[in-house]
Image (cartoon, grey):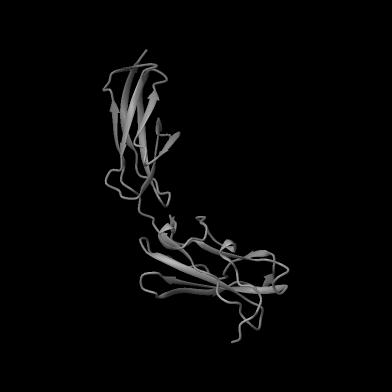
Amino acid sequence: MAHATFPRPTVDQLATIDPASTCVRGEARPSLAGTTPRLRAFVPAGENPPSVSVQFRMVDLASGQRVFTASSPTMVTGVWFEPETPLPELTSGRSYSWQARVFDGTTYSDWSRRCEFTVDIDRPNPPGLTVTPEGPYRVGQEITLQFSDGGSSDVVRYGYGFFGSETTSLPAGVTTAKLVLPFAGPIPLSAWSHDRAGNPSDATTVDLRISQ
């Protein structure tokens, strides 16, 4: 079939959602904490035919095997297009590449450049958490928290907070934090690891005994 002369979708006009990600290739490709993301392509009005559809295709990066091909409904341009058929469930730990092209009912545009992502639904290990000095403690005392990755290789940040609620975060390259103890009582202090895909670990919790 002949190819049209109207513009192909550009990288800036391609995105995945649920979870959201921009269009990236190579080692910087994002990790997604979901096995059925949605593909989207924006077709500008004015430089394309007034009514088009968009065809999507996806391959497994390692094997080159085609895992998905589908088209959107035909709609007016100037909106985001999505395939009518949802993606099949993708495999955690695999990387994928996808493209899109415009169809005006007779001819196709060229394929867009590729967008890539890796599916990662595996949660990281709970972090190591060390508190110094050792207790007991008093209200207003400053303590130091020391974090470690718990053996997980893709931790990008840590979070911590009292009573099972994450209220503060720091990048994984920063492994210590200072904390002033706000009130008395036995207080649980918890920490979490988060990986590139945004998956949280289970909590590591230490109980602090704090006097007035």
Q: Residue 87 location, x and y as percent?
A: 49, 67
Residue 105 located left or right of residue 153: right
Q: Is residue 91 visible?
A: yes
Examine the image and state in which quarter residue 174 appears. Answer: top left
- Image: 197 above or below 105: above
Q: Is residue 88 visible?
A: no
User: Which quarter of the image is occupied by the C terminus?
Assistant: top left
How many labels were placed on the picture?
0
Q: Residue 145 location, x and y as percent?
A: 33, 30
Residue 183 located left or right of residue 114: left
Task: Using the image as rendered, state which of residue 186 and residue 107 is in the foreground.
Answer: 107
Task: Using the image as rendered, state which of residue 176 and residue 124 is in the foreground.
Answer: 176
Residue furthest out toward the bottom: 1
Q: Which residue shows up at 26% across the image and 23% down it?
A: 134
User: Which quarter of the image is occupied by the N terminus?
Assistant: bottom right
Task: Using the image as rendered, state which of residue 193 and residue 8 is in the foreground.
Answer: 8
- Image: 132 above or below 74: above
Q: Residue 164 location, x and y as percent?
A: 40, 34
Q: Which residue shows up at 31% across the image and 50% down it?
A: 153
Task: Using the image as rendered, state which of residue 66 and residue 6 is in the foreground.
Answer: 6
Q: Residue 113 location, x and y as percent?
A: 52, 69
